[in-house]
Image (tube, rainbow, N blue to C red):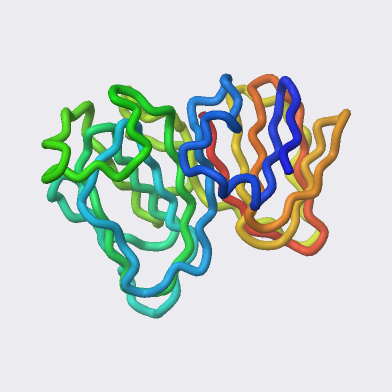
Amino acid sequence: MIITDDNFVIISKNSNEVNYWADKIYPKWSSIVTLRPCSNQKTGSGVEPHYHDCDEIWLFTKCSGEAKYKGEVWLNDKVYKITPNTVVYTPMGTLHRFQMFCDFENVAIVTRLEREKRPIHIIADEYGPPEKTVHGFVVSGEENNGPLKTKGKRCPLIELRQVCLSKNEKIERYKLSCNEYWAVLEGDVFINTGKFEAQLSSGDVALLRRELIRELRTEDGCRLALARE
C-alpha cells in the first residue's frame, strides 16, 4: 500500500521491499529513494567489497550480545567499529564492506543513482576501480544523539538516529523546516498532518515534506528511525 500527497508519502512494508532503488515510488522532492528497515539479520552477515553509483547510509539500530563492539565496517580499507545507533555514510565511489559479530537490525538509505546509474553492488575486479567523490564517515552510537556534526558537503542528511517513544508518548505538532523521514522498527505509531492520520506498523515508512505540519503519537510505545534532510 502506498498513500501519496503533495506533502507526504506513506509506504507499507510490503510495498517498500519491491525495489532497493525505488525511484518510481519515492517522491521527486526527496533526495533518497530507499528507506528500508532490515530486521532479524544474523550473526556473520556482511557484504563483499563493492561501491555504488549513489550514496548509501546505514543506521545500525539494534545489536544483540554483551560485547562492546558488534561488528566492523571498512571504508576504503579504513576499519571502524560498530555499536548500536552507529551511522555509516558511504558516498558514491567509496569501496566498502561490513561484517557483523552478532544478530542485528539496521536501516538502509540510498540516494538517487548517478553516473552510469547501475542499481547493483559494483565489484572493482569486474567493473574497474571506482571514481571517488568525497570521504565517507562513521559516527559511533555513543556520539549519535542529534544532528550530524561532520556530514560534509555531499551527505544529504543532517540527522539519522533511533528514537524510542514510551506508552502514550507523543512528539508535539510541529511545522517541518526540512524533509523528514520515519521508519517504524517496532510497535505502532500514528502520524497526523491535521488533515490526515495514518497508523504505521513495523516496516512501514513515512516521507514528510518540508513545511508540512505533523504530530506523532503512540499508544503502546514504539521504536523508530528518524532521518532529516
Position of the N terminus, as image quadrant, is top right
Q: Position of residue 102 (x, y in %)?
A: 37, 74
Residue 186, picture quadrant? bottom right
Residue drawn at x 26%, y 61% as measured from the top left: 72
Residue drawn at x 66%, y 30% as measured from the top left: 208
Residue 115, picture quadrant? top left
Q: Is residue 5 left or right of residue 20?
A: right
Q: Is residue 148 left or right of residue 30?
A: left
Q: Is residue 168 left or right of residue 163?
A: right
Q: Residue furthest bottom?
A: 66
Residue drawn at x 49%, y 26% as measured from the top left: 31
Q: Position of residue 20 (x, y in %)?
A: 47, 43
Q: Is residue 168 above or below residue 29?
A: below
Q: Residue furthest right?
A: 195
Q: Position of residue 189 (x, y in %)?
A: 75, 52
Residue 214, picture quadrant? top right
Q: Position of residue 42 (x, y in %)?
A: 41, 72
